[in-house]
Amino acid sequence: MFSHIGYQSVFHKIDTPQDTHQYNAELETVELDEIVIMAAKTYRQCDVNLFWRMILGEMPSKRGMEILNQENVFFYKSGNILKASCREPVEIINHHTGYRIRYVLQSFEHDYRSNKTEFYGMPHFEEIVSQNSREQEIWEKKRGKVYAVSLNRFLRALYRKQILEEGFNLVTKQVFLPVPLENILQVEPDVVQLNIEEPLMLFCYSQSITDQMIRDTYHTWLNRSEASAIPIQELLPTQITVYSDGTYSGTLHTRVVNQYMNGLLSMVPVEYPEITKHNF
């Protein structure tokens, strides 16, 4: 990932590492819609709050997800459409898990009419040096909890076709039936092709799933309880290529059903060590 003020961000997946790699970075061209100059700004504080909740998973705070350069994020609202942009990486300190995050925001758009949000960006994680062993222990425990129910771990389990063993239950949206993996996966040498043709529900546990856990989840889902103790996401129709380390190419479209974990709050670096036993 390459990002610099005034240049278009460059994202490239390196399949075969070389001693050096060369890529071209082009100057950024900004095309604006027709605008009307007004004395008052077009957005409100509630629009800003919505943006941060979507990106971070919670509101910014000095002890949680701290933003170091909020003033560099630009908001624009036209009618029912809210847009946001930032011409440099958003600097974030995650005090929960001990990471410094540089988030390159490519696009953000929220439609208040449909209540639909679409955004795309790329985070870069750096570990913060802990003050003492106690702080490091707290960070490691929280990182493990985040990873246990993360999409990255789900994709690793999907690659191995062991999602139930790894604590993930994938079901059809309307009738809560398990999805046979052979219906959505095509195994090829070194990669797996995931093809989702209709919305599916992903229930994310942090341990191997038992029949009783599935029955409890079904009861919760049947009653549309938002107080579910586990993260639930909706996987929308998409086609992606999944690799063994949990990375993927293509665009994975998801929708958070409950607010248990969301945004950068629910992410750890893609190279985070895979955990085979969970005692969280």
Image (cartoon, helix red, strand yellow):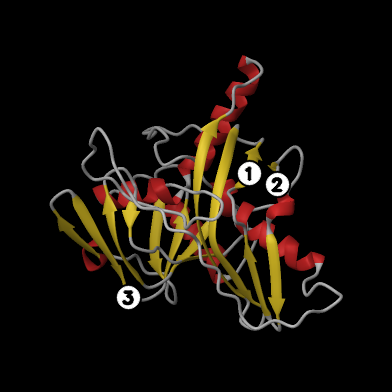
Tag 2–tag 1 contact (CB < 8 Å)? yes
Of tags 3 and 1, the one toward the viewer is: 1
Q: Is residue 8 left or right of residue 164?
A: right
Q: Earlier in the sequence, mark 3 or mark 1?
A: 1
The amino acid type found where label 2 is placed reads Asn
Q: Position of residue 188 (x, y in %)?
A: 14, 56
Task: Please name whichever residue, 118 or 173, is drawn nearer the observer in this view of the structure.
Answer: 118
Label 3, label 2: how far apart the Cα atoms are: 40 Å
Residue 107 placement: quadrant: bottom right
Q: Earlier in the sequence, mark 2 or mark 1?
A: 2
Question: Residue at 37% of width from left, 76% of height from top?
Answer: 198
Question: Residue at 82% of width from left, 79% of height from top?
Answer: 38
The amino acid type found where label 3 is placed reads Glu
Pointer 3 residue: 197
Q: Residues within 10 Å of mark 3 (few under 14, many from 20)?
A: few
Pointer 2 residue: 69
Question: Residue at 44% of width from left, 42% of height from top?
Answer: 207
Pointer 1 residue: 91
The amino acid type found where label 1 is placed reads Glu
